[in-house]
Image: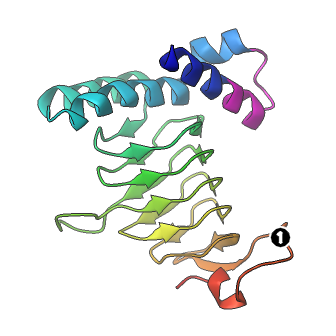
Amino acid sequence: MAAFSRVREDIAAARAHDPAARGPFEVFLIYSGLHAVWWHRAANALWRRGFRFLPRALSQFARFLTGVEIHPGATIGRRLFIDHGMGVVIGETAVVGDDVHLYHGVTLGGTGHDRGKRHPTIGDRVVVGAGAQVLGDIEIAHDSAVGANAVVVRSAGPWTTLTGIPATGRPRRGAPLEVPDEADFYVI
């Protein structure tokens, strides 16, 4: 029963993020970003049980079907919405929080051949714009936004807007009044 409730939750999140979504049946059938997340859940379950080839094969099959590549080792939170999907890549050690919204062409990638944690950690309620590249073992804290085509290579605190190449940070519009020290807003 938990799988069905997660699917309903995903569909509701897609409808909340996408004003073009006409209804739950349409979202269920044709939203490739959701299909990619659902394939990832199956592959990740096998990956956590120690299988390696089959989860990788499933993720590549899902990539063929959806245009979204999520490594089966990636940790994905609840209600991830991948809008338009095509070209999204999420690396093996990436961690994506709850209620994250990724647009097409986003890469959550590594910067080299190091072992261990080498992909970014994305906090809860983060929006990552089209074509953005978030690279390396960095953290984008909760309630932040990454602008389209930004290249982020340094961590950022909560309620930060990141734009540019390389990305620089500034306080995000709508931040709560009780915010941490202003230095926490900027790229570290």
Q: Is residue 162 left or right of residue 92?
A: right
Where residue 151 appears, x then y in whole percent?
50, 69
Element type where label 1 sits in the image: loop
Tell me the residue that label 1 is attached to: 176
- Crowding at dot 1, Cα within 10 Å, few <14 / some 14-19 / many 20+, comes out as few
Q: Is residue 135 left or right of residue 168?
A: left
Where residue 73 appears, x then y in whole percent?
28, 43
**Magenta residue span:** 12-23
Name the quadrant containing residue 108: bottom left
Name the quadrant containing residue 23: top right
Q: Is residue 135 above or below residue 65?
A: below
In this view, the residue in front, 166 or 118, is: 118
Q: Residue at x 33, y 51 (%)?
A: 91
Q: Residue at x 29, y 49 (%)?
A: 92
Name the quadrant containing residue 171: bottom right
Q: Any magenta on residue 15?
A: yes
Question: How many numbered badges does the structure rendering display?
Answer: 1
Q: Any magenta on residue 171?
A: no
